[in-house]
Image (spheres, helix red, strand yellow):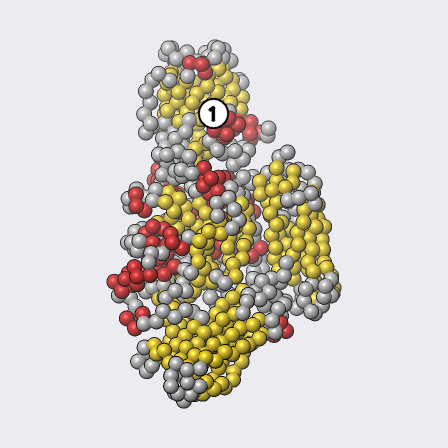
Amino acid sequence: MDCMQQETYNYDFSGTDNGHHRLRLVNFEVQANHTSHETQGLSNIRLVVRRGKPFKLTLLFHSQAWDPHTEGLVLEVCLGDLSEKIPVQFSSEWSNPQRWSATVYPENLQPQSVTIHICSPVLSSVGLYDLLIHINTLKHRLSYTLGRFVLLCNPWLKDDPVYMPLDDHLQEYIKNDYGVVYTGTNSNICRRPWVFGQYEPGVLEACLKLLQVSPQHFRDSLKDYSLRADPVYLSRVVCAMVNCNDDLGILEGKWQGSYKGGVRPTDWSGSADILRRWFSSNCIPVRYGQCWVYASVLCTVMRVLGVPSRVVTVFNAAHDSDGSLKVEEYYTSRGEKLGLSKDSIWNFHVWAECWMRRPDLGAGFDGWQVVDPTPQEKSAGIFCCGPCPVTAVQQHCLGAPYDTPFIYASVNADIIRLIVRDGLVVGRTVDTDWVGQLIYTKKVGSDNPVNLIHNYKGTKEQTEAVKITMKTIPAKYFTSGSTSCSGAMEDGAGQMSPSLEVTLTMDRVPSLGDSIHMCVTVTNRSNSPRVLMELVNAQLKEYNSTPQGSFWKVHKKVHIQPHEVLTLHHIIPHSEYDTVLAGDDIVNLAVVIKDVMTNKRVLATQEFNVNPPQITIEIEGGDSIQMKKKHTALVSFTNQFIKPLTGALLTVEGFGLLQSKQESRLVLLQPGEKIEKKVSIVASSPGTKLLLATFSHSKCPTIVSRSFHKVSVTTV
């Protein structure tokens, strides 16, 4: 036991006073308390307990034990400048459950020791407490500082506002240190493992530090300490502190450009390294984060503080900054997507949900609350979002705090796609179904996803009624229910006409190295033949909607007969995209069909991400390893492309498993040839760890493939 553990767990008071009663030792009974309070592993230097549940400590005296008939024993708990004195009572004496209590049971009173059971009120504030004791006699008073302990929320206790009744949910949303974040597109969902790391050394200390350096604490520490009993308040403080936009927060965001001077957001695989970097640098923001990193770090902090939390991904999430419930997207008459709108549709957006009661709103709004730390819009003047009751979104209660209209729009907004030419709108399609198409979180006890869409969305009729009531969208925008991969010709008044319909579909989700196959279907419902121009465009885009330059396009004239259904097939060979498209990239496909006689245009779009080639990771002896014992991992990548790859680089890292990155390089990797790296891994702590492997080559500007491998570490 190191010196800090001695100070916290078993403090020796020998020689500290010369009074009648001289306290010799305090034992914080850490193993028993941590087991009883479900806090095993959260700290090896502090006693960590949960509010509303008794914990015990034992006092050892030099002479005879405390005599309750002639001496008064008073504990004192201090949270900053807030303090409360707690008279020690026998079990037969009544104690107020709304106040701190300290009880001695007769069997715990020994000749030279006494065991005291201490219980906090269920609505105690979360934080790091100092514990003192005062021994009062008729002649003198002796006082001792016993040490410090951490008090957390208690989701096991029915009266706690974060109470969660099901054991398997408590295991998943509080104790589990491993999760899965879902990314990609709704047509090709990718799994990104994440280690929340709440049991890693230093993580608890970082979470407590976060509370101490918040603007709320600097502004009024007494008020902040008092309000920390409320998980609604806690979630707003933590949400704002995960980003660094207004404060000394944890993460600095970056969505494009160079990531020099920091870590690419896609390279993170766990929260512990981020939190420890922030803590050890004295609150300098860690570079860089994006939505899934922000949400996962928040999930770690809230689980540490005792609030059940999970990471949730919304596919096709709307960023509606003006509350209009509509997002406009602009395309050229050649089908190129433009970055003109202040609003956007993200292929995926990740936020967190935290479980709590909402006494400020009523029981109907209890349960999961959206808390989104990605800095997008300000809430009450700061960059945070939530907690917003998921039920409020489902039931269209847009007045419920906090930030419900923004969350509602994220899953319910309409997309207005506009074709512009020479500054004029020459075509328009409306999509009322694309936004919030899937809402995924990790299933309890499984790595598979569960779709939460019914938690967030009422019926389509209810959603349309809300939009009409709000009167934020002109009526003409509701004349079409077309999907984002189809369109129809408009008449001169902007209303939809069924005379010409266009759809754009993918034959299958391609893997990197394959040709991309697509199909444009044009239906002529009129009685006249038509001469059409087909303009198809493919361009790279960021998942948060930022379009980049086109890398492939086709323009050609086609003829269609009355009532004919015309099918046009297109192929983008690998050679057309191999230098621009990598494993995490997303492609926007668009087709504009122009009637040559009338100059009217129809737009159809589709977005997809390719499947990257696989990196193989194998642990000799299986995926369960023993702590502090050396194990071997073999990592390999086989070139499945038809061309040799120059400057091949295979990189392996593993937080909690490897001290530093391990690399293997080949000047030339021939088709069918394998590059591999054998590494020795040693786990310093139990729990779930991840090995991360990446592959890149000199002709591609970004990583071609990234793979994760879950490793379970046991103590025996």
Q: Residues within 10 Å of mark 1 (few under 14, many from 20)?
A: many
- Residue 274 makes an appearance in the image: no
Give residue 657's position: percent from left, percent from top: 64, 44
Residue 118 seen in the figure: yes
Query: For the point 51% across and 41% down, which residue is it?
Result: 176
Rendered location of residue 658, percent (x, y): 65, 46
Circle 1: residue type:
Leu
**Above or below 641: residue 567:** below
Q: Quadrant of residue 460?
A: bottom left
3 relative position to 404: left or right? right
Reading the image, the residue beneath label 1 is 146
Q: Pick the quarter of the image with the N terminus.
A: top right
Instruction: Please tell me which residue is depicted at 54% across the width and 39% down the height of the picture.
Output: 199
**Quarter of the image that includes the C terminus:** top right
Q: Nearer the viewer, residue 476 or 210?
A: 476
Q: Position of residue 497 (x, y in %)?
A: 34, 78
